[in-house]
Each structure stands twice: as structure tokens, then as C-alpha cells.
Amino acid sequence: MPDLLNITVVIGLIVVAGAGLALIQRQRLTIQREAFQALAARRGWSLTVSDQKLGRPSVLRLTSRSGHGWTAQTRRQAPGPQGSPAQQTTEFDADEPHWSDGLIIVGPEVPLAADGTNPLSALESPEGQRWLARFMGQDVAKYGTVLKAYEVNPAITVLATADPVHRIDFGDLAKLFAVWEQPVWGDRGHPILILGPEGMRLRLRHGTTRADHMERFIDLALDIGRMH
């Protein structure tokens, strides 16, 4: 009987602890959502929040109400059926500026591979495409066969399908990236700029749950957009 009583007590404590953690989580989400609502009201932006359900990712989206149209969103995709981890991204999308001559991708400085080789020397190879997927995003890897590295600034990596030197002031862009305060350290916290015929994207390879972090990210994207 004492053992049974002890087990019952432990189960009860686990249930209470679980309920407490769930309450804390709900309160945290409420505080975060209220902060985003306050941000949208203060900046004159529109806010849309959809929760994760039926395999659809949860999405928090801010959009402009005036001027050039843009959308900034952070989303979390549920774990895959084979145990792949949940993926989180934050992305800013705008129709302008754009580059009708091709595709430009700007990201963090490239570390050498373990064997001392530069991944940029063979973007079309499987190793190069794996590097592109890791550092620039899975959707960018498919362009490995047409992208070429351009040495325009040592602080950033510039890939493009055509010479981009006269399209962007890469010195000014590198300065904006240099003062960016990363919410997440390492290459995942470095912004990725994608400029092409369909417009401009600025991406972070992590989710953004704080309103002040999202505001700084949007302001960075708007500053980059004004450079062009």
C-alpha cells in the first residue's frame, strides 16, 4: 500500500506540474501576441496570427497598410513524419526592389570546409548544394548550377547568376549587416538577402517570437530596400 500511495502521489505531482507548465506557456504566448498587437498598432501595420493545426504551420504575419506593399512573417512547421525536426523561419517579402537581370543572393561569410576547400568553388556539386541548403536555405540549393560567387566584399558572400556589381552597393549592405544584432548567434542568425525578378526577400533561418526582434528585422529589410 505505501508503494501504491507513493506512486499515486508522484503521478499527481506530474499532472500538477504539467498543468502548471501549460498555463505558463499560454500566458507567455498571450504576452507575446499582445506585444505584436501593440507593435502593429504603433507602426500602422496589419497583424494576422494563425495557429498550427492539421499539418499546417503556425504563422504570424505583419503587412504594410501604405506605401510599397510588403509582408513579414515567422512560421513554424510541424515535425515531419520521419522525425525530422520542426523548421522555423522569418521572412520579409516585397515586390520592390527587384532585379530583372537574374538572381542575387547575399549571406554570411563562408567558412572553409574541414579539408580546407572553399564550398563556393563548386556550387553545382552535391557538396556545394548541401552548403547552399545549410547556409542560404533549401530552396536556394536548386540554383547551384547557375550561381557564381563574386568577391565584392570580404564580410559577406555574394552569389549571382550575372554580374551584380552595378545593382547593389555591397559596401553599404555589408555595413547594415555588420550592425545587425542577431537574436540567434551563428550563421542561422545572419540575414539572407535574395533579390530577383519577383522582388526582394530577406530571410532568417529561425523563428521570431519577440515583437522587438521582428520590428528590428523589418526595419533592416526596409533600410535595404531603400538602398536600391
Image (cartoon, rainbow, N blue to C red):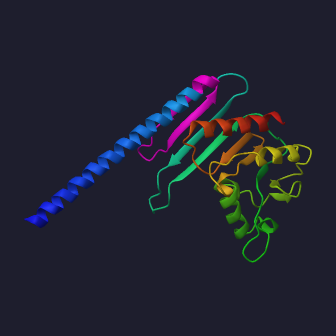
> Residue 60 at x, y = what percent?
54, 37
Residue 218, placed above or below residue 1: above
Q: In which quarter of the image is residue 116?
A: bottom right
Tell whether 169 sits left or right of 210. right
- Residue with the most extreme right position: 166
> Residue 183 at x, y = what percent?
63, 48
Q: Return the residue nearer the eye: 216 or 6.
A: 6
Tell whether 217 sits left or right of 10. right
Q: How many labels does the image show?
A: 0
The region drawn magenta spans 40-64
- Residue with the most extreme bottom position: 115
Classify the position of the C terminus by image quarter.
top right
Q: In which quarter of the image is residue 145?
A: bottom right
Classify the position of the N terminus by image quarter.
bottom left
Is residue 79 magenta-colored? no
Residue visible at 88% across and 43% down in the picture: 167
> Residue 68 at x, y = what percent?
73, 27
Residue visible at 62% across and 30% down in the picture: 63
> Residue 158 at x, y = what percent?
82, 54
Is residue 48 magenta-colored? yes
Residue 179, placed above or below residue 13: above
Q: In which quarter of the image is residue 211?
A: top right
Residue visible at 79% across and 68% down in the picture: 122
Residue visible at 55% across and 29% down in the picture: 47
